[in-house]
Amino acid sequence: MIHVAILQTPYLEAILEGRKTIEMRLTRTSRAPFEAVEVGERLYFKQSGGPFRATAVVDHVLFMGDLKPVDLARLRRDYNEWIGAEPAFWSARRDCRFCTLLWLREVEQVRFGPRMRPHHGVAWQCLPESADVYPACAVRAEAKTRATSNAPQRGESPAPLPGGDLIIALTEGNLRHGHIYLTGHIDRFPADALGGPTRAQAGRPLRLHLDGAGVIETDIVRRRSIFRSRAWRGWFARHGARPGDRVRLTPVGPRDFQVTLLAAAPS
């Protein structure tokens, strides 16, 4: 099942900026999303009176019923740091008896969402998996198209780079060992993506959309300033990478990067 949540703009902005990581719904009756959402399901966020703005995957759920004022006070105390609700919200819902808490992961900006019924004030819709849905990765796909169309061929100067890209030059050691150096760029990645030296100490993975080679998920080995995945060696070979070529990482989501190869300028 997929879900559509209608939200006011300030809450949407907080989700996209990573300040709001729990979506909460308080209801007076046991209606959706109460006991209607499962871990791993896709959730779309639509701006009230506006377009779709974000999507996320449900990482954890908690349902509570038969709430009393003391329970609501405890909810506010324990979770509002991640919910981000204003005092007026809690006051307006002080007589609610059912609570749904949804922890969010893989939050992404989108421009489109599923085809849905007119909601007429209903702030939550549950739709079947077969619902007509535009790709959740619409924004990433557009960025990939732009990056691919702008990538220079060998012997050509690279096109002007948009702000926010990371450009990393390749060395012989990178090609030989199958990695790229992120030295000086670590602060551009989410802190929770930085892991220890062993896989047991891995951070939360990022998604790298390798041009022509699909998507890999990997964290960053903090001490060595490299991506843990060694899928690079095959990707370098596929594109005929040489020392002096550059890897461009274009942020296309909070945890997603489109990766393309830029040929070295002719000497």
Image: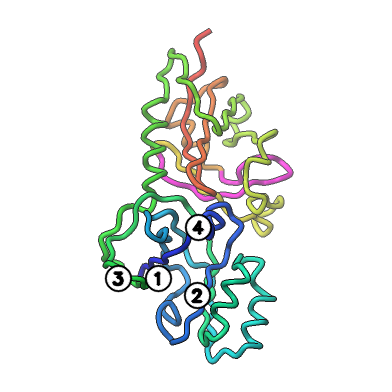
The image shows residue 85 at horizontal and vertical percentages of: 59, 68
Residue wearing tag 3: 128
Disc number lying in front (3 or 2): 2
Under circle 4, the secondary element is helix
Residue 149 sits above or below residue 234 on the image: above
Cα gap from disc 3 to disc 1, whole angstroms: 17 Å
Residue wearing tag 4: 12
Instruction: Looking at the image, tell me whether mark 1 or mark 2 is earlier in sequence order.
Output: 2
Along the viewing direction, whichever of 93 and 218 lies nearer the viewer: 93
Residue wearing tag 2: 25
Cα gap from disc 1 to disc 4, whole angstroms: 14 Å
Along the viewing direction, whichever of 228 and 51 lies nearer the viewer: 51
Instruction: Looking at the image, tell me whether mark 1 or mark 4 is earlier in sequence order.
Output: 4
**The residue under label 3 is which amino acid type?**
Pro
**The residue under label 4 is which amino acid type?**
Leu
Residue wearing tag 1: 123
**In this image, 154 relative to 191: left or right?**
left
Q: In which quarter of the image is the N terminus?
A: bottom left
Residue 192: quarter of image = bottom right
